[in-house]
Amino acid sequence: MTNHLEILDNPASAGREANPYPARVQLVGAGPGDPELLTLKAVRALQTADVILYDELVNRCVLDLANPRARQIHVGKRGGGPSWKQRDIHELILAHAFGGRGIVRLKGGDPFVFGRGGEELAALREAGLEVEVIPGITAAVAAAASTQIPLTHRQLSRTVTFLSGAGPGHGLPEFTHIDLEALNDGLHTVAVYMAVKTSHALGTTLIGAGWDPETPVLAIENATRHQERRVRASIRDLAERPEALALKSPAILLIGRVAGLPVHGQLDVIETANTKRPTRELAYA
């Protein structure tokens, strides 16, 4: 009978032939940052993992809940900075999994919401590995809960669209795949991820699609973390002076009438170029 500890400790076992029954890989959502928002299933996975490969935006407090004997490997991606290539991440997961180790691939938010979880799942399935996906609270939902701004509201928003503000390879955003004019019905919320560097292009595109420039925008940095910051603006502000929001990653934008509702907690309101007009705040029905 093969000794499992020998497989873990033997560097030669990294080859795929070393273990004919590769360990299960778990794609785990770490949520927005607050460790108390992890699912029980995610915590259990962290506590039993042999190897944890975690992303840049994973709160280190989440890693404090992990098996103390687990090897933790940072494989983060950050736009404009040194980043792991996705292919190399796939190979690293496979090397450890075929070495008999139990793998947690820990991703900020939810693995399947702008987290490249689909790409990693495909690579693991192609290699014949058993995979489990454990969802996490995505940033839009977390930001809505923290600010107490509903993504949907019977009088103000009946649909929601999650949109990436980053293009492939951290390039310019591409909005041609979505009919923004059709969403401009006054009853829609757009939640934009990774839009700090591209908010100007986003605002300009929305105005070009017929959106009211005074449509409220609520930007939330570091949702659910102790350094969370909220800024209220408008689509016009995104198009004309996005630097006034002074946003830093990670941040998410909520755009639509719901973004004008009263916010729970502290709120920054930016000034326009020539006035001190605050963005209009709506009242709950």
Image: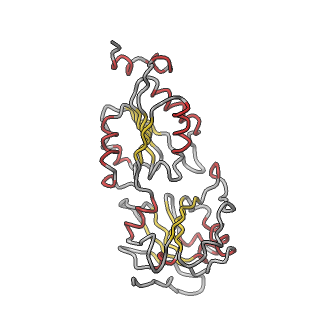
32 relative position to 95: left or right: left
Where's residue 190, x and y in %? 54, 68
Where's residue 280, x and y in %? 49, 85
Q: Residue at x 49, y 26 (%)?
A: 95
Taking 176 as reference, is 264 above or below it? below
> Looking at this view, is 49 or 265 the one in front?
49
* Corner quadrant of residue 21: top left
* Corner quadrant of residue 37: bottom left
* Corner quadrant of residue 70: top left
Q: How many marks?
A: 0
Taking 98 as reference, is 135 above or below it? below
169 relative position to 21: left or right: right
Q: Residue at x 66, y 53 (%)?
A: 171
- Which corner quadrant holds the C terminus? bottom left
Colouring convention used in this rendered image of the protein: secondary structure
Where's residue 73, x and y in %? 44, 36
